[in-house]
Amino acid sequence: MKEEDRHEAAPCSIVHRTSYTVHRFIFALNPNHMHYRTLGQTGERLSAIGLGCMGMSHGYGPFDDTESIATLHRSLELGINFWDTADMYGPYKNEELISEVLVPNRSRIFLATKFGFRMAEDGSRFFDGSPAYLRTAVEGSLRRLRTDVIDLYYAHRIDPNVPVEEMVGAMADLVREGKVRYLGLSEASEASIRKAHAVHPIAAVQSEYSLLSREVEAVLPTLRELGISLVPYSPLARGLVTATLSKEALAPNDFRHTLPRLQGEHWENNQALVGEFAQKAAAKGCTPAQLALAWVLSKGEDLIPIPGTKKVKYLEENAGAAVITLSPEEQAGIEALLERYPQVGERYAPEMMQFVNQ
Ligand SMILES: NC(=O)c1ccc[n+]([C@@H]2O[C@H](COP(=O)([O-])OP(=O)(O)OC[C@H]3O[C@@H](n4cnc5c(N)ncnc54)[C@H](OP(=O)(O)O)[C@@H]3O)[C@@H](O)[C@H]2O)c1
């Protein structure tokens, strides 16, 4: 879709197009406008807007490796130094793809990947957090990424069959061996986070967080007490809050067809919510995607979102959110809007929700 068409599809399109140009222009002039945030207690400075690479190879087809490679290069020009992938994206293809830009630019990128999801013979997914599988997984990721160290290694989920202390103890061995620099958890409960952190410092917890997914706010005080960053994944609610998502335009095998949020009354609720949200973005002089990311950033310096895109134009737009601040009145206006549309729907279908550690 051409840029013009994309904005035609959004409410208040003229204002969006104008503001989009403004924020994109800022970055064209000077990529040093990117802001940086410190990861946990590591001292590492990461771009306030990271880059989620999943959609380049997984979930949100069709894929275009040439455009994805251009997006990865452009992220470096924009000062985006925090890339997120996982072995299961593709599966495996995403790590191989990003290695093409990672290898010649290794020192400029803080690279996060994850382990634990496996495919059964019948194609179903299961989670394996065992120390034995961890060994296989980390060697596979290092090989595909063509690097000798992973900056941030996450357990993609908590395995109910493996004590979290055992899993994190094995992950800590990888730090001692120099294969991994810092440890993270994804979708972990408060109890799991505390147990893990007692074994080895956890630098980041990656969980879904956006205007439509706020459950992790209950865990934020614990993260703050322990000095752990929150890395919000799907901060654009998988594209839903950008006011550009069309169900009809999704590929037949797009993962989002499985999401309750795109069904029935939830879809109606979310369309109305997003329509009004787009008006707020227009009033602010930015795009809905930028306002959604600015809202996440406004929740604290310890949040480092990783919006996902495979397109240069979206990347540039999202990078522009780093310079947008919200007044208390604007924040309150957004909160009030969310309260008026509570029927957003679950963030996963039950098959995937079972993996979330609660
Ligand atoms: N830990 C976990 O379990 C977990 C789960 C899911 C995701 N993640 C990570 O989090 C990252 C981000 O999550 P996500 O990709 O699911 O969701 P997201 O960032 O909320 O949304 C991505 C979707 O929004 C679209 N988009 C991005 N910027 C846009 C813009 N400015 N205007 C309009 N549309 C825009 C993308 O389109 P295009 O694809 O066309 O660019 C894509 O369809 C992933 O890449 C992955 O690394 C982790």
Image (spheres, helix red, strand yellow):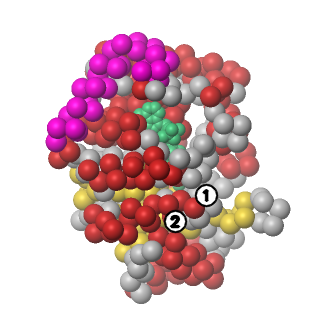
Looking at the image, which residue is at 65% across and 73% down? 162
Using the image, determine if residue 270 lies above or below residue 347: above
Label 2 CB less than 8 angstroms from ligand 1: no
Q: Which amino acid does label 2 sit on?
A: Glu
Q: Are marks 1 and 2 in contact (CB under 8 Å)?
A: yes
One can see residue 49 in this view: yes
Q: Earlier in the sequence, mark 1 or mark 2?
A: 1
Residue shown at the point (50%, 18%) measured from the top left: 9
Residue 199 drawn at (x, y percent): 45, 77
**What span is colored magenta in the figure?**
4-30
**Structural distance between the alpha carbons of marks 1 and 2:** 9 Å
The crowd level at tag 2 (other Cα within 10 Å; few <14, some 14-19, many 20+) is some
Q: Quadrant of residue 167?
A: bottom right
Vertical side of 323 occupied by 95: above or below = below
Q: Position of residue 40 (x, y in %)?
A: 32, 61
- Name the foreground residue: 292 vs 42: 292
Q: Which of 355 and 96 is in front in this view?
A: 96
Residue at which label 2 appears = 96
**Mark number displayed over residue 90:** 1
Q: Main secondary structure of the magenta part?
A: helix
Front-most of 128 and 50?
50
Q: Is mark 1 on a helix, strand or loop?
A: loop
Q: Is mark 2 on a helix, strand or loop?
A: helix
